[in-house]
Image (spheres, grey):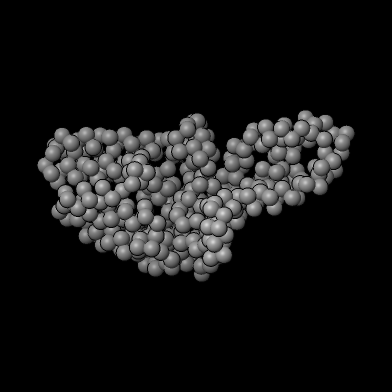
């Protein structure tokens, strides 16, 4: 899956690769893209006897880009269904397919239009490692299968083949080969928007029924459904995953569950754990955990909330605003100050942002924000 929220391990980039990236002043992700593209492209160099306009091939690559992402995500979805998972929707760039209602709903939206994602409910946490491994592997394998079928055809194609056939066939084969390999190779990027290879690496490193698989599964569950079942919550409380990012995801899931269940003591404890765990994680994790901690206090402190909000960068504020988190915090701040009008305005903006996020991205990752905002709206309307 491209550009998703699904890794569950704290990726650690090999020091030699980090030094190489620093030496040439380019992000590691750019070097990874260039190296994989060059390596896969070398397989197509012997096909120089084919006669077609290279510009036509680039046009066809652009044409096949979105369908290749759709194939990739359908591979994830089909494997998930075969493993007993429920398929909730599919995102492929601007293409959004909602499957939660009675009828599939197809929309095109530029909202968060990068990458792709298959939205799934992985089901119960038992036997999760095996099911997730097949699901993550199926996406890249689908792309590689397309490349494996089309590549031999290109080998037997000769100069007598029309360019109108060879150019699109070449583009279809190349883009699926590059996309398949790109998603299988771990990105070693800290964060949650990484490749299928990162998720597979986490699952391969873990033991059977490992806590790392449970942490990863909880993230997929929250993205697909927005809530944790009692079985999931119990399994998460029992699990103790290795790696700071795994532990952070576990704390985030349990914190959100406690907030939805209105268990303030548990929400406060999990938020404190998130703050402690996030010390060695990227800045966004530390700042968002600090914000959740002050919001979870039994008596919210206006000064502490204001300081946590001021610590956020403009980009972080924009991201949290899209979820509804920022306006949730502003509403709690206004209520702590006794400013009902400001609280109503913040709740109204937050509800609109949270619902827009769910409607246009199909993700339910911000369900905790939406639940709290709806609760605050009911409280303020009395």
Depth check: give the residue in front, 293 or 236. Answer: 293
Does residue 104 appear in the picture of this structure? Answer: no
Percent x, y of residue 2: 54, 47
Does residue 321 appear in the picture of this structure? Answer: yes
Residue that appears at 29% across and 43% down: 326
Depth check: give the residue in front, 84 or 58. Answer: 58
Q: Is residue 168 left or right of residue 295?
A: right
Q: Please, is residue 272 above or below residue 355 in the view?
A: below
Q: Which quadrant is home to the C terminus?
A: top left
Q: Please, is residue 93 above or below residue 300 in the view?
A: above
Q: Please, is residue 347 above or below residue 152 in the view?
A: above
Residue that appears at 60% across and 50% down: 33
Depth check: give the residue in front, 81 or 298. Answer: 298
Residue that appears at 38% across and 63% down: 280
Given the current orientation, which residue lies at the most extreme left position?
338
Percent x, y of residue 219: 43, 54
Residue that appears at 71% across and 38% down: 171
Depth check: give the residue in front, 162 or 215. Answer: 162
- Residue 359 in which image quadrant: top left
Percent x, y of residue 109: 47, 31
Q: Is residue 112 left or right of residue 308?
A: right
Q: Please, is residue 88 above or below residue 300 in the view?
A: above
């Amino acid at each position: 899956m491209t550009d998703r929220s699904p890794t569950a391990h704290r990726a650690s980039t090999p020091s030699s690769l980090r030094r190489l990236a620093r030496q040439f002043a380019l992000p590691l992700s750019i070097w990874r893209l260039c190296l994989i593209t060059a390596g896969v492209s070398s397989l197509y160099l012997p096909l120089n006897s084919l006669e077609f306009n290279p510009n036509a091939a680039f046009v066809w690559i652009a044409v096949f880009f979105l369908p290749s992402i759709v194939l990739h995500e359908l591979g994830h979805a089909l494997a998930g269904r075969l493993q007993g998972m429920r398929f909730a929707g599919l995102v492929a760039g601007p293409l959004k397919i909602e499957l939660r209602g009675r009828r599939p709903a197809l929309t095109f939206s530029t909202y968060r239009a990068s990458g792709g994602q298959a939205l799934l409910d992985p089901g119960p946490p038992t036997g999760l490692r095996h099911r997730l491994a097949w699901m993550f592997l199926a996406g890249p394998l689908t792309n590689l299968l397309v490349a494996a079928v089309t590549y031999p055809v290109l080998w037997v194609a000769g100069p007598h083949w029309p360019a109108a056939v060879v150019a699109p066939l070449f583009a279809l084969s190349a883009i699926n080969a590059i996309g398949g390999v790109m998603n299988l190779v771990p990105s070693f990027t800290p964060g949650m928007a990484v490749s299928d290879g990162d998720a597979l690496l986490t699952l391969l490193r873990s033991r059977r029924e490992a806590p790392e698989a449970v942490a990863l599964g909880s993230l997929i569950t929250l993205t697909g459904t927005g809530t944790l079942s009692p079985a999931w919550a119990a399994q998460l409380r029992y699990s103790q995953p290795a790696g700071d990012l795994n532990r952070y995801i576990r704390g985030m899931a349990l914190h959100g569950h406690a907030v939805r269940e209105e268990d303030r003591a548990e929400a406060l404890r999990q938020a404190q754990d998130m703050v402690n765990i996030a010390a060695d994680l990227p800045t966004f994790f530390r700042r968002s955990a600090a914000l959740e901690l002050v919001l979870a206090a039994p008596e919210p402190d206006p000064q502490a909330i204001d300081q946590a909000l001021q610590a956020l960068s403009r980009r972080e504020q924009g991201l949290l605003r899209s979820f509804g988190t920022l306006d949730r915090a502003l509403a709690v701040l206004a209520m702590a100050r006794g400013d009902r009008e400001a609280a109503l305005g913040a709740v109204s903006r937050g509800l609109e942002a949270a619902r827009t996020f769910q409607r246009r991205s199909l993700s339910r990752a911000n369900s905790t924000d939406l639940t709290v905002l709806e609760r605050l709206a009911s409280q303020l309307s009395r």
